[in-house]
Each structure stands twice: as C-alpha cells, then as structure tokens.
Amino acid sequence: MNGETTRANASHEPRTTGSVIHWPVRYDALVWLLTLGRERRFREKLIEHARLGAGETVLDVGCGTGTLAIIAKRRVGASGSVFGIDPSPAMIARARSKARRADVEVDFRTGVVEALQFPDGQFDVVLSTLMMHHLPRAAREACGREMRRVLKPGGRALVVDFGARPSGKKSFIGHFHRRGHLKLDAVVGVLTGAGLNVVESGAVGTRNLYFALATAPQEFPSTAGRLG
C-alpha cells in the first residue's frame, strides 16, 4: 500500500478493516489512464451485467468518485433511485460534485460495507465494482451478508473485480495497493455464503476483469434483520 492509501481510522470517519483511497482527483486520473479516456464506456459495459431496469432502487457499495452510480441513475430513470457509499469523505465529496455537474440525483453517503446504514430489503440491485479486493476475508464476508440483507427478495447483486493474471502476477492496477486482485472463486464463495444464488459469472472482456451476478431468494431469511 502506498502512502496515500490508508485505513479509515480517524475518529470522524467510519471504520473499516479494508483499504481506503483518499485521493479522488488522482484516482480519476488513474482510471482515465487505464481506460484510455473511455471511463464512461468502460463503466457502462460493466453495468450491463446488472440488467438494470426503469424504476429500480440501486445501491453502489464502494462507489468511489461516483461515475458508475451516475450511470446507474440514468438507467433507472426518474422513477428509480440510486445510492452510493464509500468510506472516504473525499471520494464522496467528489461524487456529489460530479452528480451536480451531470444534473443527476444520486444519494451519496459516507459509509462502510461491513455495516450498511439501510433497512432490510430496500434495494432491487446492489453493485460492487472494483472494490471487494480491497477487503480482507472477514470484511468480504461481512460485506456479502450486508449486501444480502439490504436486497429485496429476488433482488440482484453484481460484483466485478480483478482476477489474477495467468502468470500469477498482479495487474497494472495491483501495483497501486496491497490487494490487487481476488479470485472469482473467492467472490462466488462470499456470495453463496451470504445466501445468494450465483446465476452467471465469467470474464468481462476487459483486461483481467470478471463478474459474478447473484440473486436473493424470493423470501427473507427467518432470522430477523438489522437496521444499521
């Protein structure tokens, strides 16, 4: 982990055991570089796997500077709603600024994936893109359980992340933080362990990215949920 990527341990920030990025301008510049200036097209390709529809309610966990959440809002339209959370206040501030410039209404909040501040069964879709590899195993499992909890019966969870290259070497982005990739099997295990049903998975077709799409059962678990 470089000096600019830290853990959220200040008293005014939500606490997470995952890595937190606090440099939004530099982050956007890095994404621009990695996507050859085509971030919007790149994000739109990722979000296709979520099969968003008009009027749906969407949560983007680890939303970063908000580009994906803004695209999601355009997909669900005026009758839908989109929320984005990230543990970095700096990233959330930039996300809100982007949404204002785009004239798109997205509810961006500072928060952590291990304890989502939303009621049970609020969302049709939960998105996690290029985020889960930042979490240690226990936090990934907690994230999976929280994603499951806030999904409506039959709702969908989409995870997109970096897999290891065949050589076992980290991808280019992996050199910018400690946890540069995560095997697809590990993500499938998180989702199924949380009680979700993985219905589709595979390569995204860009660099070494993969996706896993899962659905929630048609009824809530018998145990009572938790409002964070």
Image: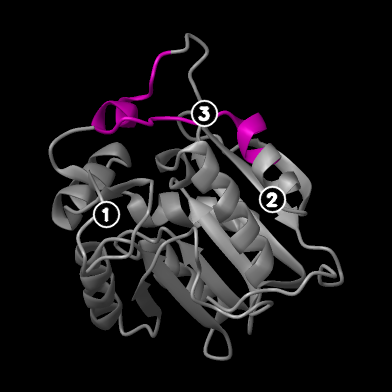
Image-quadrant location for residue 91:
bottom left
- Identity, as a three-letter code, of the amino acid under mark 3: Gly
SS at mark 3 in the image: loop
Q: Residue furthest bottom?
A: 79
Q: CA distance from mark 3 to mark 2?
A: 16 Å
- Identity, as a three-letter code, of the amino acid under mark 2: Leu
Residue depth check, mark 2 versus mark 1: number of the one nearer the observer: 1
Q: Residue furthest top?
A: 167
Lateral position of residue 122 relative to residue 20, left or right: right
Colour convention: one colour
Q: Mark 1 — residue? A: 8
Q: Mark 3 — residue? A: 163
Mark 1 or mark 2, which is nearer the start of the sequence? 1
Q: Count neighbours of disc 2 (C-alpha within 10 A) and say few if under 14, some if 14 to 19, many if 20 or more.
A: many
Does the magenta run of residues contain 184? yes
Q: Mark 2 — residue? A: 213
Q: CA distance from mark 3 to mark 1?
A: 25 Å
